[in-house]
Amino acid sequence: MKMEGKKIVIIGGKRSGMALARLVVALRGKAGISEQGTQEALAKEFRDWAVHHHVALEFNGHTRGFVEDGDLIVLSPGVRIDTLPVQWAKNKGIPVLGEIEFAAQFCSKPIIAVTGSNGKTTVCTLIKEVLEHAGRKACLCGNIGHPFSEYVLDLDQKDYVVLEISSFQLESVLDPSSTLRTHPDCDHRVKGFKPHIAVILNFSQNHLDRHQDLQEYLGAKKRIFLNQDKDDFAVLNYGDPQLKALASCVKSQVVYFNVPSDSPESVNPNHLAVLAVGRILGVSDGCCREVFQRFKGVEHRLEKVRCLDGIDFINDSKATTVEAAGWALKNLNQPVVLICGGRDKNVDFSVLIGPIREKVKKIYAIGEARAKIRRAFGTVSSFEECEGLEEAVNKARQSASRGDCVLLSPMCASFDMFKDFEHRGRVFKEIVNRLK
């Protein structure tokens, strides 16, 4: 895909939008960013850079003229594919790509892509560490916090790209029959997003505030395999019937993990997924297990912040789903004072009634979803609503006893009160570390 002289309009700013603009400029194209929010959505340093490189910027909403001036539209992951700027572009015959697929046009290395409802960051991090322990070099990016676009032109010293992918990033992936891929006269003829190894870890309710229902959500996840062929690999969770059934509709070689004969209950399914990827790439199980033994986890996922007066404070801000919070409760062997809440993803909290009843002494709920969480758990556990995270931490500390843990495991998105789950986790740690 040739960018020189082409006007690329990026819908949505923030991390991905800024990385996309820098990529377009590096490719000698003309970049423009249309951002729904204020100019503070883009760092001042970037805004200064944009002026110097003649990058057009518009804030406080999208305008039709700005969008229709583009030769190609690229969507940041947070932008829905049914949004008005996409409709304007399609009505004018302007091609539309997502950030992941756009960046993939310029990727020179094999991609290992991982999606799923839970565990993506941990598995991607482990795959990178396993590859490096085996003497290979990998670039870790995507939904993990570093946009693919930021690194795609800097892969000469890498052997693989390990890419964490959300359903938001997959829903815009073009299928093989798209005219953008097949029409010989298309100025923007593109190759499809085609990971050499594509992994779906698990599937459970999530992002139902964005997707119409679970089938649409699963449909977005399945697009990770859409452009694979017989030389590629689809890694599927045998223990999840919906994912196991996908074997009949992929063109690539199917490799299962979490097979009953290989996975006693004590084995972590995330580790089994990494083992499966390692075997495809010729990395020994022993090499993988050495990495598992020394792995200390990822920030914001069951991260122990401190022990104060015999009470453990644990940051699990990355638990933005009910199932992720359930995993945290399952893996804690002490009474829990739970801090949860945020922006609801239209999920059913009641599936955690059993673990809440068994493990949780008291719940402190914050954010937009706190009333809904009360309806789910108010009769199961002692319950109190709080106005903010600091109030919840202070009250949790007061109600916890020696040997308990105070667990931030929100079950919700963070955007009602914080920039993202990382911001929420950092604020939690700052509050905890200030406790006397």
Image: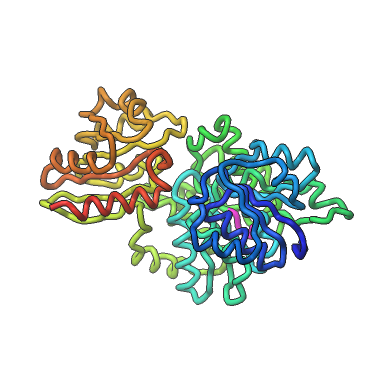
138 or 369, nearer to the observer: 369
Q: Which residues are magenta?
A: 194-198
- Left or right: 276 with respect to 298? right
What residue is drawn where x is 56% and y is 42%? 60
426 or 104, nearer to the observer: 426
What residue is drawn where x is 18% and y is 39%? 395
- The magenta stretch spans residue 36: no
- Left or right: 278 with respect to 106? left
Estimate the x, y position of residue 48 in percent, counting from the top left: 54, 63
Residue 359 in the image: above or below residue 118: above
Main secondary structure along the magenta-highlighted residues: loop
View extreme (right): residue: 185
- Left or right: 322 with respect to 142? left
What residue is drawn where x is 72% and y is 43%? 65
Where residue 90 sits, quadrant-wise, is top right
How are the colours assigned in the image? rainbow
Residue 271 in the image: above or below residue 392: below
What residue is drawn where x is 27% and y is 53%? 429
- Residue 167 in view in this figure: no
Estimate the x, y position of residue 202 in percent, counting from the top left: 50, 44
Estimate the x, y position of residue 412 in percent, counting from the top left: 40, 38
Estimate the x, y position of residue 221 in percent, counting from the top left: 59, 43
Where residue 105 sits, quadrant-wise, is bottom right
- Residue 227 in view in this figure: yes
